[in-house]
Amino acid sequence: MLRRKKIAIISVLLAYAIIVPVFAVYLYQTQPKYVTNGVTFQTPTLVLGLYWNQECTIPATSIDFGSMIQPHYETVLRSNPIYLKNEGDVPILIWWNSTLGSVTSEIPEDWDLELFWDRTQLGSGIRELSAGQVLATWYMIKIPPYVTIGTYNWTLTIWGTY
């Protein structure tokens, strides 16, 4: 008899433990409130200008290092200053590559940028430019002594990413 009372009490407590929270959630739940939200994404304007002058009025489209006699010592040829201008409305990271390596392995290339350039980004990335910022740079090639005689033409590509 005592055992039946214990089982009955435990059964009632278990039922109470299960049923009361279910009814409490059902009976005491508030109505949902809705709040409208929104976000507008604008397409950033990414425009990189390359110019021969600091005022950014003369576009740079090609670099001609000219003709030379085969050197007896390493010769570094630098372009005239090239001014990179971020003409977009967001900061961009400047990148570059060229096809010179597929034309010849004898002539290495590099960039010489203004002193505040962070050289840790050397590789294919150069630096970040803020909207409207102008960066002076020089493209360089190094002609080794007794380089193979010929005409070398290649494509230099410069672009910006957001």
Image (cartoon, grey):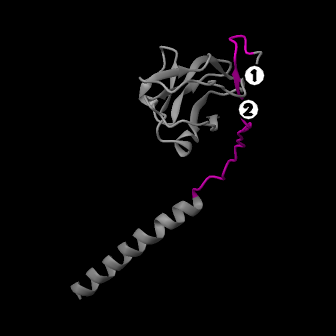
Q: Residue at x 41, y 28 (%)?
A: 120
Q: Which mark is residue 45?
A: 2
Q: Residue at x 51, y 36 (%)?
A: 124
The answer to whether 22 is drawn above or below residue 117 in the figure is below
The answer to whether 12 is drawn above or below residue 31 in the figure is below
On the image, the x and y values in percent for residue 42 come to 74, 36
Q: Residues within 10 Å of mark 2 (few under 14, many from 20)?
A: some
Per the rendered image, the range of residues in magenta is: 28-56
User: Considering the numbered disc 2 on the image, is that residue within a helix, a strand or a loop?
Assistant: loop
- Whether pointer 1 and pointer 2 mark residues with C-beta atoms closer than 8 Å, the reply is no
User: Considering the numbered disc 1 on the image, is that residue within a helix, a strand or a loop?
Assistant: loop
Amino acid type at image mark 2: Thr
Q: Residue furthest right?
A: 57
Q: Residues within 10 Å of mark 1 (few under 14, many from 20)?
A: few
In this image, 3 relative to 91: left or right?
left
Q: Which residue is mark 1?
A: 59
Amino acid type at image mark 1: Pro
> Is label 1 or label 2 in front?
1
